[in-house]
Image: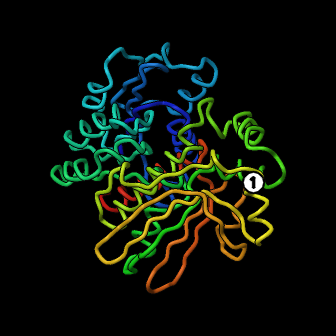
Amino acid sequence: MWKIGVVGFGNVSQGLLRILDKKAQTLKERYGFGCTVTAIADPVKGSVLNTSGLDIGGLLAEFDHKGDLKAHPHATDMGTIDIIRQSEADIVVEATITNLKTGEPGVTHIRTALEAGKHVVSTNKGPVSTSLPDLLEVARNHGVEYLFEGVVLSGTPAINLARDALAGCDISRVLGIVNGTTNYILTRMEEGMAYEEALAKAQELGYAEADPTGDVEGWDAAVKAQVLANVLMGKALRIEDVDKRGITGITSENIQAAKSRGNRIKLIAEVASTGSKVSAKVAPMELPLSHPLANIMDAVNALTFTTDHLGDVTIIGPGAGRVETGQALLTDILSIHRKRG
């Protein structure tokens, strides 16, 4: 029976716990996997600790009713670092807010867990962007796993697809639509909306934040390109090494001009390996309608891997969502279970 500790109780962690609660019997029968959640650390929504195991269903019901866990019978004022160390968790789920400048507080949370001999699964892009080589070394030195499938395409397999299903292939290029917000905006613009109107609609639907800079100026896509370059092609690129241009300069006229040429504009993240050189960039590109990525519309993501054995392999799926990203965490947890269980 695995013990799991959760750091950050936002939508992603809630999505994971709902899956674990709903599918407990299925996971046991199908994979021989069983778990108990011993801790949740979230200074805003409330922290709880019970090393004997928490009632996930009851905890979720309380949270849905009250909006926090501060009155839970096992509520604690203990700090996050102490909770990580005292949770007795075998696996720590780190799903706190992304900080692309320093990676904190995620880096410290992950390092603390790894140094305590705990496996870590995470959807936090910040630590992967700023500190991946260091954190992987800490994991190796302590004989544990640090996995982060969800940082690229949420629950749609990207890293695991390349590492496992495409094992033995050389990947020379990856092209991807990795930001659903910008893809939604470009889709609406092709239908006739102006950029400002399409952005407002994306914000109304929750695809874009009140400050959409990270999406529309290409930062989110750039860090995903950086991760793909570092993980799949073994280069320690910094976010500053990614040539980045977003969609704020794209006009309705640009969209229609591309359409008249039989093309469609997409914000594309590209990683390419040429000899010993690896490059990564993000920019709007005109793709012919025959290209599989040209027909990815709305808030959907996709990646095309160019390989030596299989040619182009494209995967399409959701790149965000509570349950969808929770699935990424579950995938990594089950990977640890298969390797270490």
Question: Of 164 and 23, which appears nearest the observer?
Answer: 164
Q: Is 262 placed above or below 240 here?
A: below
| Residue 236 spot, x, y in % from top left | 28, 57
Residue drawn at point x = 66 percent, y = 69 percent: 287
Instruction: Left or right? Give the position of 195 relative to 270.
Output: right
Q: Quadrant of residue 226?
A: bottom left
Q: Quadrant of the C terminus?
A: bottom left
- From where the camera sits, is residue 303 visible? yes
Report the number of discs: 1
Q: Residue furthest right?
A: 192
Label 1, residues with CA under 10 Å away: few <14, some 14-19, many ≥20: many
Question: Of 109 and 196, which appears nearest the observer?
Answer: 196
- From where the camera sits, is residue 330 visible? no
Helix, strand or loop at mark 1 = helix
Question: Of 19 and 129, which appears nearest the observer?
Answer: 129
Residue drawn at point x = 36 percent, y = 76 percent: 274
Residue drawn at point x = 53 percent, y = 27 percent: 59
Instruction: Left or right? Give the position of 195 relative to 32.
Output: right
**At label 1, which amino acid type do we have?**
Thr
Q: Is 331 placed above or below 161 here?
A: above
Question: Of 123 and 277, which appears nearest the observer?
Answer: 277
Residue linked to disc 1: 187
Residue drawn at point x = 55 percent, y = 70 percent: 304
Q: Quadrant of residue 314?
A: bottom right
